[in-house]
Amino acid sequence: MPAAPLPLVVAGAVGGAAAAGLSLLVLVVIALAAWMLDPSGAQEWTQMLEVASGAWLAGLGVPPTIAGVTLSLLPLGFALLPIVALVGAARWATDASAVARGTEVAVVALAAAAGFAAVAAVVAALARSLDPAVPRAALTGAALAFTVTVVVSLRRTGVISPSRLPEQVRDILAAGTIALLALVVAAGGVLAIAVVARVNDITGLIVGLDAGASGLLLLAVLTLAYVPIAIVWAIAYLLGPGVTVSAGSVVSPYAELSDAALPGFPLLAALPGQVPSGAAMFPLAGVVAGLLAGWFLRRRGCVAMRGALCALSTAAVAGGILAIASWLTTGSAGTAALSAVGPSPAWVGLAGLGAVGLGALAVASWPERRTDG
């Protein structure tokens, strides 16, 4: 006999709380592993738990305050942990409660939001040395849990499906994804080259920190968590607007990095000290991404006037997502000169719109060739 479905509120609340707890547990295990590498060091195991809590809250968008300075340039990589956990929890809650209608999805999602928010509030309240905002932790956690649960549950129950979208909309979204993936690949290549080129500086910085095995483990994890920000910054660099690294100092293909004092973080050491040869051609990476998107649109039958409209729509999608990504990767990395670092959302969005649009139009706007039989 099949088991009776769980009540909607119970399934949602348990799923949300479990997603919060399990994603936090991953960081707790890493922090305690770092402490075990040097148990006689200056840090107590309780302080390492606060480090894990701060990292988890940072992934939710809750900035920590260290030595009186609020750091809002947050490691977005940590956000993957609660998101992945919430996807699994939403799938379980949907199946366990036999959700079948949109109203039931809303109940499960609200319960998941409440369960996740409760854990987030407790974690923020216990991480006193980092002074996180407890209401913000609860609200952002609830918003994330609600959004993920709604999307997963609606998709799992078949209430929404990509196949229900108009074909042209699907083509535009797919073309925008192709353009963005092309930019991510190009940015990843540029970042890898920059790291290799500045490997001596990066190594010297790490050695100078004298962090020991424990500190190196935490530094490695933190560096991985900041890789998504580094990718977005590399895209901003490729497209031309560049990145503000301190007050009045912008690094771009058209401007050299000044002698601004930057935090001693390995990825920042990869910033180019001077404009590379041929850097003025870097924005063509966006045009190439647009060419790939335009080629896809053309293969899908979007040509001539229809192709031009699809190309412009694709460019708008790419530009909008790039602007949002730039906004998420801009914030404070310290006091005074480092209070606002990162790319300009407006300029990066416009640069992406223009470059991708130019490439996509160049391919998709031409009429289809006809040959006489």
Image: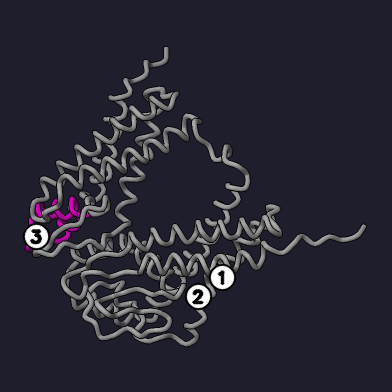
Question: Are dots 2 and 1 in contact, CB under 8 Å?
Answer: yes
Viewer-proximal residue among 352 and 268: 352
Query: Among all residues in the image, which is located at the extreme right?
Result: 373
Q: Which residue is mark 2?
A: 283
Q: Position of residue 328 (x, y in %)?
A: 33, 59
In this rendering, the answer to whether 3 lies above or below 63 is above
Q: Pointers 3 and 1 in contact (CB under 8 A)?
A: no
Quarter of the image holding residue 302?
Answer: bottom right
Q: Is residue 179 magenta?
A: no
Kindly identify which numbered label has been placed on residue 43.
Answer: 3
**Residue at (34% x, 64% y) in the render:** 229
Tell me which numbered mark, 3 or 1, is placed earlier along the sequence: 3
Please provide the residue range marked out in magenta.
Answer: 33-55
Give the label on residue 89, or none. none
Q: Which of the two marks, 3 or 1, is nearer to us in this view?
A: 1
- Name the residue located 20 percent from the left edge and 46 percent from the top edge: 137
Residue 21: percent from left, percent from top: 23, 40
Determine crowd level at label 3: few under 14, some 14-19, many 20+ residues with C-alpha closer than 10 A. Answer: few
The mark that comes first in sequence, 3 or 2, is 3
Identify the residue under disc 1: 287
Percent x, y for residue 272?
Answer: 36, 81
Q: What kind of residue is marked 3?
A: Gln
